[in-house]
Image (cartoon, helix red, strand yellow):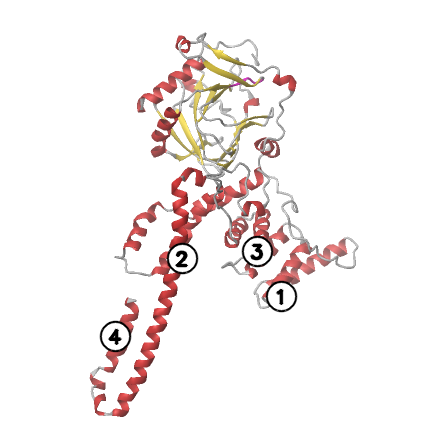
Amino acid sequence: MAAFLVFMLLTLSSFCSPTRAEIFTSISQMTDLIFTERELVQSLKEYIEAEEMKLEAVKSWANKLDMLTRLSTSDPEGFLAHPVNAYKLMKRLNTEWSELESLVLQDPSDGFISNMSVHRQSFPDEEDEKGAAKALMRLQDTYKLDSESFSKGKLPGQRQYSGVRYNAELTVDDCFDMGKLAYNENDYYHSVLWMQQALRQMDSGEDAKTAKADILDYLSYSVYQMGDLPRAIELTQRLVAIDPSHQRAGGNLRYFEQLLSKELRDRGRSQQEPADERPIQLDTYERPKDYLPEREVYEALCRGEGVKMTSKRRSRLFCRYQDGSRNPRLLLKPMKEEDEWDSPHIVRFLEALSDEEIGKIKELAKPKLARATVRDPKTGVLTVAHYRVSKSAWLEGEDDPVIARVNQRIEDITGLTVDTAELLQVANYGVGGQYEPHYDFSRRPFDSNLKVDGNRLATYLNYMSDVEAGGATVFPDFGAAIWPRKGTAVFWYNLFKSGEGDYRTRHAACPVLVGSKWVSNKWIHERGQEFRRPCGLTEVD
């Protein structure tokens, strides 16, 4: 508005300048002003109309977000339990709010712009949006979810509130952005999946800002990169039909056709077979192999498949009360134990944490949460890694009586001293949060951390939340899957009594599909356990 008023004043002032000061002396010249004023009025009306349209767009956006924030703030963790909601929140704050800010174009002293400036420092950035998108693809792979169901927000294990499921759908533009991210990362497998889904939704009549030509452009080249020349040609032909002047389509089409002709000649075929007209489905192309040798076994266990729990093994599992044989404190409240696995022995402790204790641990950890790190096997330096996606915090017994009480309880239950154990580590796994297969014990004999307190003898893991879908702790070597149950804890030894590492204990935290996973763990070291867990005479004792 201010800019337009300045323009109006400058225009009017030009008619009042000294060089035009005698206009009033001629009716002929004054009649020109009549038409000038009419043009100004028309221009003003057009300006008002444009501002009203802009304001309507802003009001529409505000109303939509008002409804969404009413829903999300009523149960933030429940809302963000759906990974699509988490991704779209990253996208809105990183991209869409900035677009709205540009649309408003008001004076910096305006309340909205000032508010945006204050909060912008806490907004997610491009890396956050990219990380959330990659998390969706990770979930898609691990749990074998087709793009269409994912786009509609149909995930297993979703929670319902008052019978109403959270609305968490991906638009054409969302699917396009997912595919474009994968494309830019040279991940043509996922680019095909999401570009095809964007095209599928657009063809069904869904409105979008993205042009169909752009979708076909990315999709055709991604299909070519996956080695499907007939499909790449068919998609590029569609692109040329929509946009004959497209700068790359014509050249790509000729190149693809030449490659296909050469392939057919090499195979002794004289004519090109017709392109397959069927839409690309999730299983059309094989997912590329990656660095993780047990990928298929690990992800199958995450889905609850391939668990090697036989009737014979189950017959060796028991539940019991621990009534003070290790510590007289347990006489007052014996600990309930359940065997989860026989060999290596994994046990679950029930009622290991109360809701009040869990709440306090979360409260203490939240201000300290930072991206979890791993130790580089070559350098020994702590660093972030794509295969560990979570945030963690370390809590000392001096931080609060609850932490001291939990540490004491771990010692009572396990019979091992925690004087040489590491601090209580609290971890929260967000959208697609995971920790791929790893060992808790160190396999580096020169590790300086081992010189004082020895290797990580055992792992004690508290589950501090239920997880609606996903999030299991799995052991690919022997096919076990342990599911989170709030308030329980699991325990296993990482080392044999000889001190040698038990390589069967390689384990993983599966990606969280629906929900938010909170855990806390205690890594118990060797020193101080000499009389509590004496050494064995053989490697496997």
Q: Nearer the viewer, residue 291 or 287?
A: 287
Among the two numbered marks 2 and 3 on one chain, the one whose residue lies closer to the N terminus: 2
**Residue that label 1 marks:** 241
Among the two numbered marks 1 and 2 on one chain, the one whose residue lies closer to the N terminus: 2
C-alpha separation, residue under disc 2 versus residue under disc 3:
31 Å
C-alpha separation, residue under disc 1 versus residue under disc 4:
50 Å
**Which is more foreground, mark 1 or mark 4?**
4
**Residue that label 3 marks:** 218
Among the two numbered marks 1 and 4 on one chain, the one whose residue lies closer to the N terminus: 4
From where the camera sits, is residue 334 visible?
yes
**Residue that label 2 marks:** 60
From where the camera sits, is residue 127 visible?
no
SS at mark 2 in the image:
helix
SS at mark 3 in the image:
helix
Among the two numbered marks 4 and 2 on one chain, the one whose residue lies closer to the N terminus: 4
Please state which amino acid type lies under the numbered disc 4. Leu
C-alpha separation, residue under disc 4 versus residue under disc 3:
49 Å
* Label 2 CA crowd tier, 10 Å (few <14, some 14–19, many 20+): few
Q: Are marks 2 and 3 in contact (CB under 8 Å)?
A: no
**Which is more foreground, mark 4 or mark 3?**
4
**Residue that label 4 marks:** 9
107 on left or right of 389: left
Residue 439 in the image: state x and y as whole percent.
Answer: 52, 26
Judge whether 390 appears above or below 7 on screen. Answer: above
Among the two numbered marks 3 and 1 on one chain, the one whose residue lies closer to the N terminus: 3
Q: Nearer the viewer, residue 424 or 302?
A: 302
Q: Are marks 1 and 2 in contact (CB under 8 Å)?
A: no
Q: Which residues are magenta?
A: 343-347
Asked if residue 344 is among those painted magenta in the image, a careful observer would answer yes
Q: Quadrant of residue 449?
A: top left
